[in-house]
Image: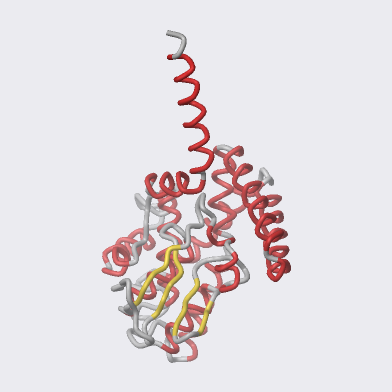
Amino acid sequence: MAMKKETTADEVVLYDYPFSYNCQIVRLALCEKDLPGKTIRIDIGPMMEQFKPSFMRLNPSGQVPVLLHQNKVVTQTLEILHYLDQYLPGTQLIPSATDNRSAMEKWVAMERAFPEADFTYGLLEQGSGKIVARDMEHRKRLIEKHMAVNPDLADCYKLKLEAVTDWQMRLRDPDLVDRLVDQIYKMLDELEQQLAGRDFIVTENYTLADVVWTAFLARLEMVGFKRMWSFGARPNIEEYYIRMKQRSSFACAPIHLKSSPWLVIGSAIKAFRLQLSLSLGIGLLALLSVLALF
């Protein structure tokens, strides 16, 4: 996907964040279709730019990805995937035959029903609940701050606040990750059986089912669950995933397997630069005070 600074009216603009799971799915589809366009990064890390009024006016749900094409805004991941295939050129990712399309939609729906954010943040909660707790409280404070000074967006911010609060409550469930791991095992068992004798999930061609499941397997590898299919545990999935990673779209997207600490650190520095400046200033004053004693 040749994304660049300038774009024509027929090209796409993707509001994107590198490690967003849903953004990775959309980027993978764009790369498979070889569609040019422009990306605009919305920092959903420490900066939490998805809550800014300008972005909430674009997408009231305050989520990435968002696709802009010919002044049309498309906001849900699955809707974006269907829009790309229906209205833009390139390789068709949705089968034309009714039976094949129904089969593809079944596999896409299975992946879309899995709460990836609950799973990823649930793992963080298990590792260090304090990090997740601080993150959620920071989100709520920021939403409330924006809501107070943007009364025209009050309803959107209220819904977002409720969504974050509900998410926070789900993550406090000590059995959440165990239940989701069980669900993953069942999903992979079905996928292993489906892939027997197949290069792709549904037809002899790459479809949206392969887009979403490639991203799903990549996310599992990123969080340390590659063992679920590697070393012969599920050989059909193992061979399939190797093939998907060898496609040029995987590197083009790119589908990140590890978070870059510098991306997070840079975002954190921007988000908390005032606090850092104050801390450095206080530290400098303290040092000068000590030096003045000599």
Q: Is residue 94 above or below residue 158?
A: below
The C terminus lies in quadrant? top left
Q: Position of residue 170 (x, y in %)?
A: 68, 52
Vertical comparison of 39 with 287: above or below: below
Coordinates of residue 114 in the picture (x, y in percent)? 57, 63
In the shown orientation, is residue 244 left or right of residue 98?
A: left
**Left-right relation of 48 to 145:** left
Query: Who's the residue at 45% across and 13% down the image?
Result: 292
Front in this rendered view, residue 187 or 251:
251
Picture quadrant of residue 116: bottom right
Residue in the picture at 52% in, 84% down: 102
In the rendered view, tell whether residue 267 sits above or below residue 130: below
Residue 183 sits in quarter: bottom right
**The N terminus is located in which quarter?**
bottom left
Residue at the extreme bottom: 97
Q: Position of residue 79 (x, y in %)?
A: 53, 79
Q: Where in the figure is residue 47, as x and y percent of width and height?
A: 51, 52
Q: Quadrant of residue 17?
A: bottom left
Q: Residue at x 49, y 24 (%)?
A: 285
Left or right of 164 on screen, residue 92: left
